[in-house]
Amino acid sequence: MVTLLNIILSLLQQLQQYVVAQLAVWARWLVLSQQQELKVGYIEIEEPEGTVITRGTKPPPRHTYMSGNETGNGHAVAGEAKTTKKSSSSSSSSSSSSLKSLESLEGRLKDHSNTAWLRLLLFGSLGLAEAYMAGEVDSPDLTTFLVVMLLAENRPATAWAKQTAYDVFFRWSVVGPALLRKAHDVATARLNAVRHYSLSNALFAAFLDGTMTYSCPLWRGDPAGGPLSTMAEVQEENSKDSLNDHHDAEDDTDTLEEAQKRKLRFVVRAARIKPTDHVLEIGGGWGSFAILAASETGCRVTTITPSEEQASLIRERVTATASLSPGQVQVLVCDYREVPPPSSSSSESSTGREGGRFDMVVSIEMLEQVGHECLTTYFRCVDRYLTAGPGGIAVFQSITMSDAHYERYLSGPDDFVRRYVFTGGELPSVAALVEGVRRGAGGRLVVEDVSSAGAHYARALRCWRRRFLDRFDGEIVP
């Protein structure tokens, strides 16, 4: 009986392998039939049996194609400019060099299992990521492969990755939208915080800067630290370094810690914080804003986080900061919907503050966890917490999704970041934020300024990646 059962199980296993193999062959054909020729760059995909699939035009040998330095990745790039002086001729030269650099990109992927094609058909770019994590594919330079696939010029050729079988089913089926709808209630928000922010304080300390700031910094450019006026210089810097994983964007003149402090001071100025103010920070991280704002302005700060792990470290850091007086920074473990009224102080009557409200509200990269359906609730809470009148100011920093892609983003299945990095996360768009303010505050909150600092993020991500890799074996794994 046992022998017969083993035979049946073996036959079922062989049948499963045969079916998967046949489906993989069909998936390979379907994916390749949908993919058009690349306009920029070149990729090679080596299959298990040795067949090589190519897309794009293979560039000539580097030494005959262009001159310049060679990066740590082994890709030839145009020689870096020796001056940052702006002129029409230098801009044209830089644009030409960048185009040549892109045309010379060669991405390579090794396919160890034909089932990777099935993942690609079903889940698109997420399937490719999961195939990589499962060891079904690998690459000597995954970054360059992805850069070629993600270039704007190649989007028509890679559009198939967005119209996967999984995507089509969930977007157009009756049950899809209901299954994709994310819960953002208080209990789920706490669970999501535990999954990410409570992993380990030591883990985040290993790759963040000394301030423990986990958000976009402002790199040097405008002396005032304003994001808009630094965009051109930052974008120029990013274009030079985007293919160089070994360049961490830090130097003696502008470190990541200095850039983060510049951003924090920019927020302090934007909120116009005074010594007599009581500030509510929604999403305290590991305390960098609360500590800097209270230390440098003399204000009081109440900072909230749903993570006990974060709150514990904030309290330790506040205690260790000699410039802070007892009670100047209060740390609460709660959801943004559960903030209690601020405790009274002797200065409230003299400042004319409305009882039970805060003078300012600050939130730095926390809105990404609120969710589209809760944006109105979020800003209704902000309206309730913030003192009425012209003195009440709220400042928010958020990663956003472009308005043009927002509806598709909301209605589509999870991407890699939402599935594996920020569980429950949902990027808002600028239009959705403004509408959330209108609906939630009923006209009592007026949007005074919207600015973009997105180009500053690429350098920060390179810094974090370099620190993470450098300290992975010695500090993170143990």
Image: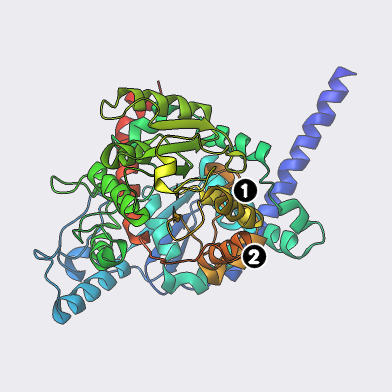
Structural crowding at the residue carrying mark 1, measured as other residues with C-alpha within 10 Å and reported as few (<14), some (14–19) or many (≥20): many
Q: Nearer the viewer, residue 272 or 305?
A: 272
Vertical position of residue 420 compared to residue 53: above or below? above
Task: Spot the residue most to the right.
Answer: 1
Task: Spot the residue most to the front.
Answer: 350
Q: Residue at x 46, y 43 (%)?
A: 280
Q: Nearer the viewer, residue 423 or 290?
A: 290
Horizontal and vertical percent for residue 433?
54, 62
Residue under circle 2? 30
Distance of mark 1 from mark 2, alpha carbons?
Answer: 13 Å
- Give the residue type at disc 2: Leu
Structural crowding at the residue carrying mark 2, measured as other residues with C-alpha within 10 Å and reported as few (<14), some (14–19) or many (≥20): some
Horizontal and vertical percent for residue 295?
28, 36
Residue under circle 1? 115
Q: Are marks 1 and 2 in contact (CB under 8 Å)?
A: no
Q: Quadrant of the C terminus?
A: top left
- Residue 127 appears in the rendering: no
Q: Nearer the viewer, residue 151 or 367?
A: 367
Q: Is residue 300 left or right of residue 322?
A: right
Q: Nearer the viewer, residue 269 or 308?
A: 269
SS at mark 2? helix
Mark closest to the chain's N terminus, 1 or 2: 2
